[in-house]
Image (cartoon, grey):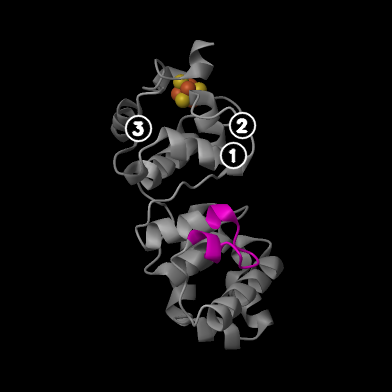
Amino acid sequence: MKNIELILSKLRDMHGKPRCELIYGNALELAVATVLSAQCTDERVNRVTLSLFAKYKSLQDYIETPLEVLEEDIKPTGFYKNKAKTIKNITREISERFKGHIPEDIDAFSTIKGIGRKSANMIVGLAYKTPAVIVDTHVARVSGRIGLTGSNNPEKIEKDLKKAIPEYLWTDISLFLILHGRYVCLARKPECERCLLQEECDYYNK
Ligand code: SF4
């Protein structure tokens, strides 16, 4: 068994506070920003959402705005045609199936087309402070290298991390693993020489 408290403390020493780098003010804004962040940097998403969130303040704003207008408004994030369709669908489904409220239940939220398991965990975990294991590409890679999971399957990784980590730390560790994968444990060449997790890491010690 890995010493999770020690791993957490070292991640904190390297990355400060657990944080999401997308800027949002509520669950709807986080959901939209999460869609826009696919294949796009958080920095660029934040530049686009600065004006987007000033213009679109409610589900109805997204639902009633013509698709072509929304496409233009999110264009700099790339893949804007698909993203606009996804945002339209998500806001419509939240309005019609969930009475206009983003569900606080991760399983229910992930049934919306365009919201995968990762996004549902991220949005519900952060917006409602519900413990959630967010398995994105960074979490999958870094948790595998450290030895918290032996799987490549996101659902199995989520299960393994839930077993290995106390529930109250699920969201914090997920956010730290994302930061660690983004800035230190890089996909192609992990920067192990400046990583504090050398002793705890299976990849480093193999
Ligand atoms: S020691 Fe290297 S492989 Fe292990 S977590 Fe740190 S950067 Fe990643």
According to the picture, the residue beneath numbered tag 2 turns out to be 151
According to the picture, the residue beneath numbered tag 3 turns out to be 11
Q: Tell me the tag on residue 39.
A: none
Looking at the image, residue 120 sits to the left or right of residue 114; the answer is left
Residue at the image point whose x is 50% and y is 24% from the top: 147
Visible in this render: residue 176?
Answer: yes
Residue at the image point whose x is 64% and y is 72% from the top: 84
Q: Position of residue 150 (x, y in %)?
A: 58, 27
Above/below status of 57 relative to 84: below
Q: Earlier in the sequence, mark 3 or mark 2?
A: 3
Looking at the image, residue 78 sits to the left or right of residue 122; the answer is right
Residue at the image point whose x is 31% and y is 26% from the top: 6
The type of residue carrying mark 1 is Lys
* CA neighbours of label 3 inside 10 A, class few (<14), some (14 to 19), many (20+): many
The type of residue carrying mark 3 is Leu
Q: Nearer the viewer, residue 103 or 174?
A: 103
Residues drawn in magenta: 106-119
Report helix, strand or loop for mark 3.
helix
Residue at the image point whose x is 34% and y is 37% from the top: 15
Q: Position of residue 26 (x, y in %)?
A: 38, 69
In which quadrant of the rendered image does the N terminus lie? top left
Q: Nearer the viewer, mark 1 or mark 3?
A: 1
According to the picture, the residue beneath numbered tag 1 turns out to be 156
Q: Position of residue 98 (x, y in %)?
A: 52, 78
Looking at the image, residue 109 sits to the left or right of residue 85; the answer is left
The type of residue carrying mark 2 is Ser
Whether pointer 1 and pointer 2 mark residues with C-beta atoms closer than 8 Å, the reply is yes
